[in-house]
């Protein structure tokens, strides 16, 4: 199996990565829309507000549901590209994380006065690994397709495993009371 990864056609690995990204985005869409309260309270850990503020909680969940829409859209586009236009798979793997990075830069522009969030944002571990692997897989393919198999086997798989481990560790972390509470 491992030799198969190293000997696979680079375009097949890139297409497979894009199909994996499509599945990931679809799962994110489901969590951000159909299970928005669960995702907000147990993964993002950003609501409920203390004291309860129904308007703020509902506004927050509305924004998360909007992310769900874009996740479904990205998942469908990634799957379509992988199946019907595989020659665009590598650029798609580079464009998606680049667009998210551009949005984050915009969020931190001084005129937005963004102060950060007290939420734990446990999805950041999974997203960091996912976006890194997408971006670098696409970039390596565009530079030299022969690099993709080695990159994917030796680096991408461990990055995915570590980021998922950190994600589940954060999600499953239960706040324990200290003596002063």
Image (tube, rainbow, N blue to C red):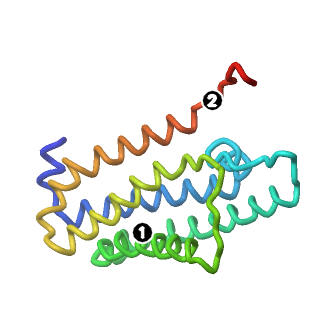
Q: Nearer the viewer, residue 105 or 6?
A: 105
Which residue ends up furthest to the bottom in the rendered image? 111
Q: Decide: is 50 above or below 110.
A: above
Quadrant containing the C terminus in the rendered view? top right
Which residue bears the numbered disc 2? 174
SS under mark 2: loop
- Tell me how many marks there are: 2
Residue 147 got which mark? none
Front one among 151 and 52? 52
> Looking at the image, which residue is at 34% across and 77% down?
85
The image position of residue 4, as x and y in percent, is 15, 48
> Which residue shows up at 65% across the image and 30% down it?
175
Residue lying at 23% horizontally and 54% vertically, measured from the top left: 152
Residue 150, located in which quarter of the rendered image? Answer: bottom left
Seen as rendered, the residue at the extreme top is 179
| Quarter of the rendering containing residue 73 | bottom right
Q: Residues within 10 Å of mark 1 (few under 14, many from 20)?
A: many
Residue at left offset 63%, top offset 29%? 174
What's the CA distance linking mark 1 and mark 2? Answer: 31 Å
Badge nearest the viewer, 1 or 2: 2
Query: Where is mark 1, residue-wise?
Result: 97
Q: Is residue 22 above or below residue 85?
A: above
Q: Is residue 162 above or below residue 40?
A: above
Disc 1 element: helix
State the image coordinates of residue 177 (x, y, percent, origin top left): 69, 24
Circles 1, 2 touching at the beta carbon (< 8 Å):
no
Extreme-front residue of the structure: 180
Residue 23: % across, % down: 47, 56
In this picture, residue 148 sits left or right of residue 123: left
């Amino acid at each position: 199996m491992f030799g198969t990864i190293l000997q696979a056609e680079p375009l097949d690995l890139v297409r497979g990565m894009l199909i994996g990204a499509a599945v990931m985005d679809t799962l994110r869409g489901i969590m951000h829309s159909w299970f928005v309260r669960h995702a907000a309270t147990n993964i993002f850990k950003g609501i409920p507000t203390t004291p309860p503020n129904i308007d703020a909680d509902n506004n927050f969940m509305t924004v998360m549901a909007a992310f769900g829409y874009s996740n479904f859209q990205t998942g469908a586009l990634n799957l379509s590209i992988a199946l019907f236009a595989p020659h665009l798979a590598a650029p798609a793997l580079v464009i998606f994380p680049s667009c998210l990075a551009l949005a984050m830069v915009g969020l931190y522009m001084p005129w937005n006065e963004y102060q950060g969030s007290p939420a734990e944002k446990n999805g950041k571990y999974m997203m960091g690994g996912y976006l890194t692997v997408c971006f670098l897989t696409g970039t390596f393919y565009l530079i030299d397709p022969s690099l993709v198999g080695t990159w994917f086997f030796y680096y991408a798989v461990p990055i995915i495993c570590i980021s998922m481990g950190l994600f589940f560790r954060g999600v499953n972390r239960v706040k324990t009371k200290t003596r002063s509470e």
